[in-house]
């Protein structure tokens, strides 16, 4: 039986490119899928977005997310989370938060990882009040904050005026264990 590449194997190759910070190669694979008669699927786009995230190419990741609908694809929570993470890695907290809000318009429900990435973007952008607001809103959305959420929120409180909040969050973590 002759082996043939499919969307899953292409996505795996793009993920490998991402691990090697070869985001351009991942994009080339994504663009070449139709020529190989392989349908581009959501996970293929997500793999390419993640490759961009790992190489700090937040604008390219955002462009990929936005172009998914042109391909007849619906961005899912993983695609949004990877794009929010790409924004967070580059300190683009405003873009990350805009994507988080856009998810509700697109009827995509954020998960704990999405919130964690958004909170991390606030931390990197020095937006401690926004980070705490996102952390506080998680239980209302039936999401349980993880250690990354708390750590990013604590780190966001590095300003001289927010040290007491950081200690309060640490206390919450200690009493949960």
Image (spheres, helix red, strand yellow):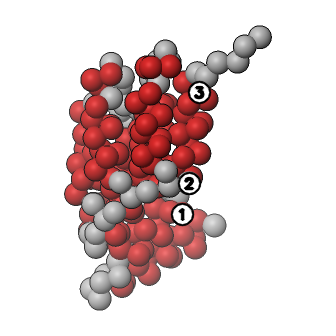
Q: Residue tagged by mark 3?
A: 8
Q: Residue tagged by mark 2?
A: 20
Vertical arrangement, residue 170 with respect to residue 116, above or below: below
Residue 124 x, y percent position in the rendering: 34, 69
Vertical arrangement, residue 68 with respect to residue 79, above or below: above
Disc 2 packing (10 Å; few <14; some 14–19; many ≥20): few
The kind of secondary structure element at disc 2 is: loop
Residue 6 x, y percent position in the rendering: 58, 21
The residue shown at (47%, 66%) is 150
Disc 3 packing (10 Å; few <14; some 14–19; many ≥20): some
Contact, CB < 8 Å: mark 1 with mark 2? no
Determine if residue 55 is in view: yes
Q: Earlier in the sequence, mark 1 or mark 3?
A: 3
Q: Residue tagged by mark 1?
A: 147
Contact, CB < 8 Å: mark 1 with mark 3? no
The residue shown at (33%, 53%) is 58
């Amino acid at each position: 039986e002759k082996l043939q590449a499919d969307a899953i194997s292409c996505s795996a190759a793009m993920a490998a490119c991402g691990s090697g910070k070869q985001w351009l190669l991942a994009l080339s694979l994504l663009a070449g899928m139709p020529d190989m008669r392989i349908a581009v699927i959501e996970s293929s786009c997500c793999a390419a977005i993640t490759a961009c995230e790992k190489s700090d190419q937040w604008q390219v990741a955002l462009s990929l997310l936005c172009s998914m609908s042109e391909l007849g694809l619906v961005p899912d929570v993983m695609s949004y989370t990877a794009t929010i993470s790409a924004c967070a890695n580059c300190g683009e907290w405003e873009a990350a938060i805009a994507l988080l809000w856009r998810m509700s318009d697109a009827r995509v429900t954020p998960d704990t990882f999405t919130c964690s990435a958004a909170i991390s973007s606030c931390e990197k952008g020095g937006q401690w009040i926004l980070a705490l607001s996102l952390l506080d809103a998680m239980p209302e959305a039936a999401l349980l904050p993880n250690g990354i959420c708390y750590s990013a929120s604590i780190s966001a409180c590095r300003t001289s005026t927010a040290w007491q909040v950081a200690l309060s969050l640490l206390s919450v973590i200690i009493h949960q264990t």
